[in-house]
Amino acid sequence: MNNVEEKIIKHSVLLPALFLLVLWLIAITEHTLDLSFHQLGVYPRSLIGLPGIIMSPFVHGDFKHLFANSVPLFVMGAGIIYFYRSLSYRVFLIIWIASGICLWIGGRPSYHIGASGLVYGMAAFLFFSGAIRRDPRLAAISLIIVFLYGGMVWGIFPIWPTISWEGHLFGGISGLACAIAYRHHGPQRKIYSWEIEEEEPEVDDEFNPESQPTSSPTNNTSITQTDSDIRYTSNS
């Protein structure tokens, strides 16, 4: 492993770890001081719920809720930064803001908290982006996401009333939209030499010397040929 690769790995791991550290410090503060920050969540179609578009991922119901989000946040956050370095920050912010706005518009009238929308958004982006790009490495990431977190798909349906399935759904839609919008950006599938068809240069007969008549012009007319055209000059 060279120094560049080592720096990329450290960078990919460090940022998700710092984000999780902030989440855990907030949860510990709530528990220690017997506080509740649930009012910082998204409350749909209400002015008091607008700050939740930004703040809701920082608030969780309890440590069990936070732990359930911590592992996928770390794994998928590191994966996006490592494999999609040039897109990772944009994708993360778009998923964060877009899913929060959609939740504020279309969610149930209740406080929606937690970083699950980010988890579903990153999972959707990694899966669909790998499938769309047809790159073997990225396709392998898609399969890993399915293997590890395929059961998450049930979270987008209104099965459990105490879970914000709308946040999951809008997060997944935001991730899918990012995968489609940025399909031509970031890492691309390698094009091998046998996939490239060599095109033969087209020859314009009008300017091909071999296609011109070999006989000399008559009536005292001479031909002066330049690089771009043929001019006929009369000597009479």
Image (cartoon, rainbow, N blue to C red):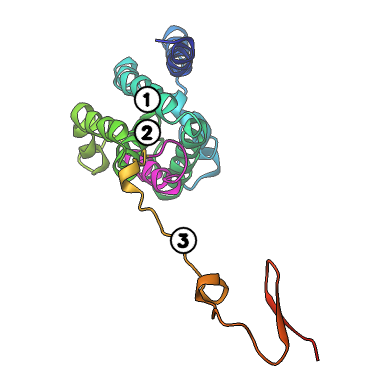
In the depicted structure, whether residue 123 falls above or below residue 181: above
Question: Which residue appears at 51% of the width and 71% of the height?
Answer: 210
Question: Which residue appears at 48% of the width and 48% of the height?
Answer: 45
Earlier-in-chain disc, 1 versus 3: 1
Amino acid carrying mark 3 in the image = Pro
In percent of width and height, residue 218 lies at 66, 90
Q: Quadrant of the N terminus?
A: top left
Please tell me the numbered disc located at residue 46.
none
Q: Is residue 45 left or right of residue 229?
A: left
Please tell me the numbered disc located at residue 79.
1
Q: Are marks 1 and 2 in contact (CB under 8 Å)?
A: yes
In the depicted structure, whether residue 74 falls above or below residue 138: above
Mark 3 and mark 2: Cα distance apart in space = 46 Å
Residue under pointer 3: 201
Range shown magenta = 165-188
Residue under pointer 2: 122
In percent of width and height, residue 5 lies at 44, 15
In percent of width and height, residue 113 lies at 40, 30
Question: Which residue appears at 25% of the width and 31% of the height?
Answer: 140
